[in-house]
Image (cartoon, helix red, strand yellow):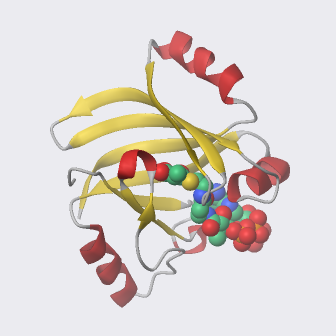
Amino acid sequence: MLTRIDHVGIAVASLTETIPIYEQAFNLKCVHQETNERQGVREAMLLVHAGDTGGSYVQLLEPLRDDTPVGKFLTKRGPGIHHIAYGVDDIDAALASLTVSGFDLVNKTPVHGTSNSRIAFIHPKGLGGVLTELVEAAGGH
Ligand code: MC0
């Protein structure tokens, strides 16, 4: 079902302050930035590895407001790892399988993600306390 680790999402107070730190520390390049109003974030994608089945990224997330998932997370826990995202070839099939298995899906059908990907979140409670995202990239994978 899973093709790769697509990204690790990290909650930060400021993209402007944090992007240069990651670029300098690991010689990464920020290859994409986007605002996702529905998710309440500004995000930056830093490429770690460009693989055959899609890339792997560090995703920095800055909340648009305090009453958003990342805003609430920052208030409660401070900056840190917010979620892990796995690549899938067929997100509809993956969600159907997880539903049959009884997992608590935050998104029962895919929503818009980075770079026109289709994404869905699975609640952290059923997965060892880790908020988990599935990503089907725009070109598949
Ligand atoms: C909250 N909790 C988490 C968590 N956020 N646990 C692990 N990781 C996280 N990131 C836990 C809290 O500690 C709490 O546990 C319980 O969940 C309820 O927390 P809450 O603060 O009351 O939050 P809720 O219930 O309002 O919402 C939690 C939920 C939400 C996971 C449903 O954050 C959500 O819908 N997330 C999915 C969307 C999202 O995160 N979007 C931003 C990234 P206790 O034990 O105290 O009950 S968007 C993105 O990444 C996109 C653009 C992309 O990749 O393309």
Q: Position of residue 7 (x, y in %)?
A: 43, 43
Asked which quadrant contains residue 130, the reply is bottom right
Of residues 67 and 25, the one nearer the viewer is: 67
Q: Is residue 25 visible?
A: yes
Q: Is residue 38 left or right of residue 52?
A: right
- Count of marks placed on residues: 0
Q: Is residue 20 above or below residue 129?
A: above
Asked which quadrant contains residue 119, the reply is bottom left
Q: Position of residue 84 (x, y in %)?
A: 48, 51
Looking at the rendered image, the quarter that the N terminus falls into is bottom left
The residue at the point 25 percent across, 76 percent down is 93
The residue at the point 80 percent across, 59 percent down is 67
The residue at the point 73 percent across, 39 percent down is 79
Q: Position of residue 3 (x, y in %)?
A: 23, 52
Q: Is residue 129 visible?
A: no
Taking the image in four quarters, ligand 1 sits in the one at bottom right
Asked which quadrant contains residue 12, the reply is top right
Q: Is residue 37 above or below residue 91?
A: above
Of residues 69 and 34, the one nearer the viewer is: 34
Q: Is residue 132 left or right of residue 110?
A: right
Q: Is residue 76 left or right of residue 139?
A: right
